Image (tube, helix red, strand yellow):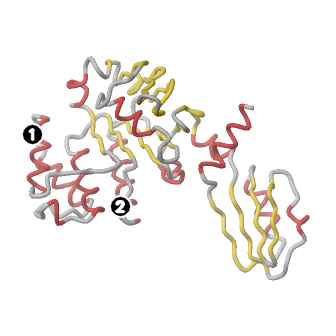
Amino acid sequence: MHAIEINNLTKTYGNARGITDVSFTIEEGEIFGFIGPNGAGKSTTIRTLLSLIFPTSGSAKIFGKDCIQFAPEIKKEIGYLPSEVFYYDNMKVIDLLKYSASFYKKDCTKRIKELAEIMDLDVTKKIDDLSLGNKKKVGIVQGLLHDPKLIILDEPTSGLDPLMQQKFFELLEQQNKRGATILFSSHILSEVQRLCDRVAIIKEGRIVTVEKISTLKENNFKRFKIDTAEALDPNFFRMTGVNNIDVQGQITSFLFKGNINQVMQKIAQIEIDNLWIEEPDLEEIFMHYYEKEA
């Protein structure tokens, strides 16, 4: 059974764009990435999936059940972290978490304590005394306290420092090993590559492609910037897979697609002072897929 099945999901806001004919499936136990620039339609898709807003057309199912018809039943199995979290400011963190746990008719006390320790969250503080990052931690604990079968995360790392991000990723991997399915929405490609098995790319409300992460890595460019002891001849890196060569004094930069060992063997032939290898931005990936379609 699919954990999530979305078929031709469309949401329009009058003349404003929402999402159009969005379709993809997520298998049970999968960590699935959903990426695109801000405003691409990720949050609209997720909110429609959760029946927080209703679609103009199309359908969505979670664990084989229609998301609108069985919404209350389905939500018991879901942990959701929105891109922005808002709470009652005067409540203490622990009171909020206990209130949230009361909807699931199970004792979540032990799990709340475990999650708070992992995320280094002081549950005795009032919500309005928390920083943005600590409010995001509250949202993470709130979303996971009932050990949901499906975890839906919309830009979950915003506000978290790098150490907390690492702990959060480890926590998600633990949840997945326990059997949880995860939908991870982000505009940061490296986060999705770190966690996910497959990924759907959305731009301007439409799905561009659904790919395995391994395929995405193989088929896309990496950006190289090399600081050499002496200025290089621009033709030195003219080889299969190298594009956009630019030499500015002792700095040479280019885009490369292919087996990275080949270009590293070429770099080993010269004396370098520094080397940078960066992930392409999402626009470069989108352009790659648009060129393939064309």
Label drawn at residue 159: 2
Q: Position of residue 152 (x, y in %)?
A: 35, 39
Q: CB atoms at circles 2 and 1 under 8 Å apart?
A: no
Quadrant that contains the N terminus: top left
Where residue 104 sits, quadrant-wise, is top left
Q: How many marks?
A: 2
Location of residue 207 with respect to 8 vertically, above or below: below
Q: Residue at position x 26%, y 59% from top?
A: 118
Q: Nearer the viewer, residue 271 or 93?
A: 93
Label drawn at residue 102: 1
Label drawn at residue 116: none
Q: Residues within 10 Å of mark 2 (few under 14, many from 20)?
A: some
Q: Amino acid at mark 2?
A: Gly
Q: Residue at position x 21%, y 47% from top?
A: 142
Q: Position of residue 154 (x, y in %)?
A: 38, 44
Mark 2 or 1, nearer chain start: 1
Q: Residues within 10 Å of mark 1 (few under 14, many from 20)?
A: few
- Of helix, strand and loop, which one carries label 2? loop
Q: Is residue 47 left or right of residue 282?
A: left
Q: Residue at position x 48%, y 40% from top?
A: 34
Q: Amino acid at mark 1?
A: Ser
